[in-house]
Amino acid sequence: MAAAWNRPALAVLAVCVHVVGLAAWSCRSNDSEPTRAAGSAASASPSAPSSRAARPPPEAAPATPAPAGPEAEPAESIVILAGGDVDLGRGTGQRILRDPSYDPFRGVAPLLAAADLRIVNQESPLSDQHGETAKPGQALVFTGPPGGADVLARAGIDAVSLANNHIWDYGKKAMLETLDNLDRVGVAYAGVSRQPNQQYHPRILRVKGWKIALFSVTHIWNQPPIEKHEGRFHVAWAAFYALERALARAREENDLVLVAYHGGAEYVDLPMQWTRDFVRAVMRARVDAIIGHHPHVPHGVGWFGERPVFYSLGNLVFGMHRDYESTGMGFFARLTFHRDGRREVEACPYHILASEPVLFAGPEQAARERLFESRLARLSLTVGGTSLGARGRFSCVPLTPPARGKSKGSR
């Protein structure tokens, strides 16, 4: 697979030269992710190959619709909150094993509670490895314990994207066990299937009378090339030709269509060209929003008309990398859709302490808010630009297409 990485590697070098002047985030964390070894599979980005008891989870439906029947009238509006990378393995997994009630989402709980549907990228499998949450001597191969599913449910997470480069870290058996654990607690998932060749089917979520189709795909794979790996039959690769018909059908049959995209280059501030190409194709299929993750640092927000692309939300529950300060801050995408067609798009930031996201507060709140807004505005210029409004509750910043006219991303 090394030969396949030549083009992306050159692209990364070029981008690094371009972004070297970007300012680093000022927030720091008490925890840090282990340094990635140069040249490791996890640090390179390949090019694309030829319960909560008090609140029931949203209804999840199979891709093939059930016989038609009376449906609830959609509510006037729905609020969707989408977050980035969640690692419930390694150190966080050990904390869950020691204390099953541990809640790494507690620092953002008020923001989670204010949404109707919550979606995150579940980066680690959730499997029983007899107390092991990372391979000995291989910090980049990890799993969360089965109790990680309970952690997600108690935090109010309704659905997770599973198509990512770590879902196969402990093999097919652990991947299937992950699905069992999520089913057990009522958390829906997309991007991975038990049966071969079903991974491109969306997960249909019904919330407040709205039907939302959630797709999940990955553009990076840690094991041998995915076109030669068993995972290709169960994990959705970011290939538009494989998604095109499913996207078209989802657009016709649902109120909203969302795509969770896992890809790009780690610790690089800008999306790679293959990411931009994939995004352009998917957005032409009239997807309502793309939710990006994997780089572990926030990227800018681009637009296709009124429809946003969050190229990378950054880390959510994840250790800060000691060599990259910008891994210590991320943001939620908050999307409010109205029946009359109006939509509101916001970025809701937080900083990360010891792998836990924490909303801005205290004497440093204003400085953190200004830093976040400044950086998001500058990074968004690289993907066509975005206009930032006056911040509101939870430090959320309203986002709209650039005021100067049609965004570059919509071309």
Image (cartoon, rainbow, N blue to C red):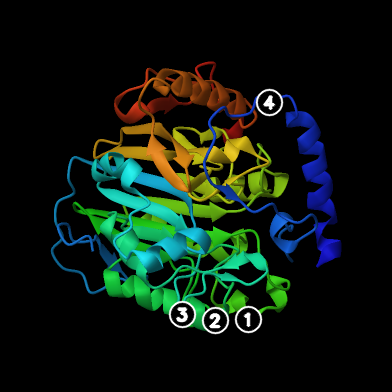
Give the structural element (helix, strand or loop) at label 2: helix
**Mark 2 → mark 3, Cα distance in angstroms:** 6 Å
**Mark 1 → mark 4, Cα distance in angstroms:** 40 Å
| In this view, the mark in front (3 or 1) | 3
Q: Residue at the spot x=84%, y=46% of the render?
A: 10
**Nearest to N terminus: mark 1 or mark 4:** 4
**Mark 3 → mark 4, Cα distance in angstroms:** 41 Å
Q: Residue at the spot x=26%, y=43% of the render?
A: 115
Q: Is residue 248 visible?
A: no
Q: In the rendered structure, which amino acid carries the disc numbered 4?
A: Leu
Q: Which of 371/301 is in front?
A: 371
Answer above or below: position of 385 versus 54: above
| In this view, the mark in front (1 or 4) | 4
**Mark 3 → mark 1, Cα distance in angstroms:** 13 Å
Residue 9 position within the rendered picture, expressed as x and y whole percent measured from the top left: 81, 50
Q: Which residue is mark 2?
A: 172
Q: In the rendered structure, which amino acid carries the disc numbered 1?
A: Glu
Report crowding for label 2: few under 14, some 14 to 19, many 20 or more residues within 10 A (C-alpha): some
**Mark 2 → mark 1, Cα distance in angstroms:** 9 Å
**Nearest to N terminus: mark 3 or mark 1:** 3
Give the structural element (helix, strand or loop) at label 3: helix
Q: Which residue is mark 1?
A: 230
